[in-house]
């Protein structure tokens, strides 16, 4: 069941609460601590941008669009901290804060995009006093928060066209509400198809080693929203397609360059299996994830601490001591494996994407 | 370093201890409890065939060839238990024991092969008394134990031809010493290349969700033997090949039918990635794994309890309560993805394998 009739006769869809919010009354950033899900729903509150930066680094918050908004809100907190300084010092400290925030994770382009957007506001208003600029930065961050939800709903509306009543959608990692402010990217078409179009859709979530965002987060938020979901080990993706159980694959993206999509490690294997079985493979992401002036060779793939693999969620050690671990956080899916990219403006094949966005981005 | 000079000048290779043994002095089956590795090396001892059957079911021992030998030794224990009965009862009870043992796991063909081989000895000697038949069954089981090691060394000798000094070999799951009596199937060519040919070879082991046989067992036994090994999440297999870090893939098999290889879930994804990157993909397995009169449609793929996925090694719960789990234990790799099958008699392409073995098997 994906909806519930309330007693006064309104069809009520459930909707996962936002992963991050700006609290006006206290000028605080509040976020869900995603490392504790699905067992505990705990909120973290930050007044210091350094705390927000650390929360990105240690993945209390994760998912490319959510990281972008967190980074913007971090910049707003920095502005509040430095707003009583003289303009030159304020600017200098803001640039240092930008460096602290962008140094947290190297692959998701939304992080750099968001910080750059905040610095643009700063640079366009250098003649104003720091207090006024700070208010503008807070508004900009809050605007990005709102835009993210609107963008995701637009992704959902466009993406829902590819879903047919009865479809089973495979997804990898979590590109859902928790990876964004709300509503998700890869999961947005599923939400739209169910909630706005009344289609029956179920999701199979790859558990997504090493940090298990699929098992923990995708399963959690879909269960929260009463959307049917099953979890499998990543290793099942090939067989489940061979057995004919998957109709569509939709994943998110951390960076889309001109010749490939960077997304959670393991995405490439799912794409290879989808290609083999002629299953449509879609990437859903906002424009802010596009970085089409780059090729795959320009991107640093984050390698994280091997402990993430060797010690599952910090609780069970699975590898003999002294054995070296390889732990790439993202992989590279070339465009020949991708049926279409779903953005807030439509669904684009590779060539169409380059034509539309390379020109509009300059 | 993969060898050590002892003080008296002999080059000493390390060799993982056997996974299972028959103890003549007590007529006991002793096996390593593989569920406790890599943290504790604990031995289980059985005098009752039901205990051996359960050890196969709950995977104290696993790996197709090791399961075969355990099943044979279980039959020998059953014979010891029933040897004082009259012949008709003895035969009837032995057949019941055979059913108990073969009911433990459905996919690995070696289990059925081993039990059938023991029943053949029984059936060819029905005129002897149960005590004499029992001694023959014990000798048969011990012979299969010895044959397994010889077979694996032959697989190693043939398979080592495909390895070049400096190669990095990717393997999935554990098809090593612990999956056999000793020496391994997929890891046998690595051992032979290092120990008999002095080649430098390193192994990258996929962790192999959900039961993590790669992280726990392959890493353990290669570290024990001083063979260089690194562990990665299964999701890394595609990227690591794209980055050019893998020279060969070698995996084991649970059943080889005329049109595909059944092996640990996730093998198919590794094979798809190897094909994409033109990396040779070999399956190493003894003849006892061949079942060439079947096609993939004839084989039941074991689906195990979802708790294996949801609760990592029974220690950390990773999925929200109430979410359904899909947990296939094996997948299917078609022959167009397989460079060659390494058996104790050589390396065979698909057509050669069918030609040689379909005729010899009748």
Image: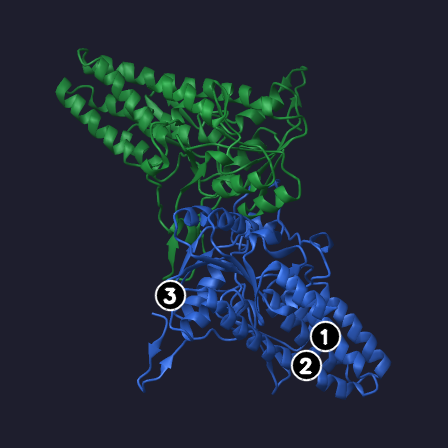
Chain colours: A green, B blue
User: Are both tags, 3 and 2, on one chain?
Assistant: yes
**Can residue A335 be seen by looking at this rendering?**
yes
Q: Tell me the distance, in whole angstroms, between the alpha carbons under discs 1 and 2.
A: 9 Å
Determine whether B175 is above or below B209 in the image.
Answer: below
Instruction: Name the residue tied to disc 3.
Output: B165
Instruction: Name the residue tied to disc 1.
Output: B117
Whether tag 1 and tag 2 are in contact, CB under 8 A, the answer is yes
Mark sitting earlier along the chain (3/2): 2
Q: In the image, residue A148 lies at what x, y percent?
A: 43, 21
Q: In the image, residue A303 lies at what x, y percent?
A: 35, 45
Secondary structure under tag 1 reads: helix
Whether tag 3 and tag 2 are in contact, CB under 8 A, the answer is no
Q: In the image, residue B134 lies at what x, y percent?
A: 73, 84
Which chain is mark 1 on? B
> Looking at the image, which residue is at 34% across and 31% down?
A294
Which quadrant holds the C terminus of chain B? bottom right
Secondary structure under tag 2 reads: helix
Determine whether A299 is above or below A284 in the image.
Answer: below
**Can residue A38 be seen by looking at this rendering?**
no
Instruction: Name the residue tied to disc 2.
Output: B140
Q: Nearer the viewer, residue B302 or B318?
A: B302
> Looking at the image, which residue is at 63% across and 59% down?
B351
């Amino acid at each position: 069941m994906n909806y519930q009739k309330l007693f006064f006769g309104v069809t009520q869809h459930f909707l996962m609460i936002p992963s991050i919010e700006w609290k006006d009354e206290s000028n605080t950033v509040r976020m869900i601590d995603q490392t504790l899900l699905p067992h505990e729903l705990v909120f973290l509150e930050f007044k210091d941008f350094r705390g927000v930066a650390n929360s990105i680094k240690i993945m209390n918050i994760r998912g490319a669009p959510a990281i972008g908004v967190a980074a913007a809100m971090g910049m707003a907190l920095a502005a509040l901290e430095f707003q009583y300084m003289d303009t030159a010092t304020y600017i200098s400290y803001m640039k240092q804060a930008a460096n602290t925030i962008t140094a947290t994770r190297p692959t998701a382009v939304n992080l750099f995009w968001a910080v750059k957007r905040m610095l643009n506001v700063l640079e366009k208003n250098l003649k104003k006093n720091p207090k006024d600029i700070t208010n503008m930065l807070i508004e900009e961050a809050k605007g990005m928060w709102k835009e993210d939800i609107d963008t995701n709903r637009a992704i959902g509306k466009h993406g829902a066209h590819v879903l047919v009543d009865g479809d089973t959608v495979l997804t990898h990692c979590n590109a859902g509400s928790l990876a964004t402010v709300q509503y998700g990217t890869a999961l947005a078409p599923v939400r739209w198809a169910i909630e706005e179009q009344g289609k029956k859709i179920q999701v199979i979530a790859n558990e997504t080693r090493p940090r298990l965002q699929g098992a923990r987060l995708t399963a959690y938020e879909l269960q929260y929203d009463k959307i049917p979901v099953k979890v499998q080990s990543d290793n099942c993706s090939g067989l489940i397609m061979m057995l004919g159980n998957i109709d569509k694959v939709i994943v998110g993206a951390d960076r889309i360059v001109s010749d490939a999509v960077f997304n959670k490690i393991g995405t490439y294997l799912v794409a290879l299996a989808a290609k083999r079985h002629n299953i449509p493979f879609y990437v859903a992401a906002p424009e802010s994830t596009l970085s089409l002036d780059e090729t795959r060779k320009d991107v640093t793939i984050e390698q994280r601490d091997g402990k993430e693999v060797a010690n599952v969620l910090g609780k069970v050690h699975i590898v003999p001591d002294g054995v070296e671990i390889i732990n790439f956080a993202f992989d590279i899916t070339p465009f020949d494996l991708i049926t279409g990219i779903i953005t807030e403006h439509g669904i684009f094949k590779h060539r169409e994407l380059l034509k539309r966005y390379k020109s509009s981005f300059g």
